[in-house]
Image (cartoon, rainbow, N blue to C red):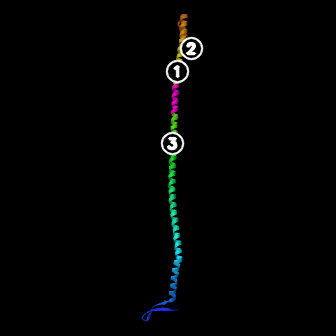
Amino acid sequence: MSHLFLSLGNQPFISLDWQVVAQLLNTLILFLILKKILFVKVKEFIDARQTEVDKMYADADTAMAEAERLKNVYSESIAGARDEAQRIVTDARRSAQDQADAILAEARAEAAVLREKAEADIVSEKKKAVNEIKDEISDIAILIAEKVVEKEITPADHEKLIAQFIDRVGE
């Protein structure tokens, strides 16, 4: 073994072992070679993996944003559908109420027309009945006049003629 001694005066200050220096030098050379060959590839692999992970995070963020957007669109669509359904129901109710009102108004108008016609028929029938009664009264009056002309009427005959008149009016 060879040792190198540095001395300060008569005592050695540092003693160097050349094997240790050679090992240090070999380690340094090995480190530089590994750095040049292996560390560059490892660094490239780590950088590629980091890029891939960053891309995954970016894709996940994009997917989350898209999911949130779709959720908002879906919520708006559901709210719009509910509003549309409510509007349709309201329109249907309004339409049904309008139809019911129209049918009721038409029925009232028809009832009024029928009532007016019935009243007109009643008035007409009443006039007809009155005219028939007048005709019968005239016929009876003529008959009474004929009988009066034929004979003189006594109070009993007069009562009898009135009774016959009333009986005929009843028919």
Q: Give the residue drawn at x 52%, y 27%.
A: 115
For residue 91, above or below residue 51: above
Element class at badge 2: helix
Which residue corresponds to mark 1? 124
Q: Nearer the viewer, residue 145 or 50?
A: 50
**Range covered by the magenta-colored residues:** 105-117
Residue 139 position, x and y percent, is 55, 11
Residue at 44% x, 94% y: name it: 11
Q: Which residue is mark 2?
A: 168
Q: Is residue 106 magenta?
A: yes
Using the rendered image of the protein, determine whether residue 69 is visible from the camera's viewpoint. Answer: yes
Amino acid type, callout 1: Ser
Q: Identify which residue is drawn at 50% across, 87% down.
A: 21
Q: Secondary structure at mark 3?
A: helix
In the displayed structure, 59 sits above or below 155; it is below
Name the mark on residue 91.
Answer: 3
Task: Say what amino acid the circle numbered 2 marks.
Answer: Arg
Determine whether label 2 and label 1 are within 8 Å by CB.
Answer: no
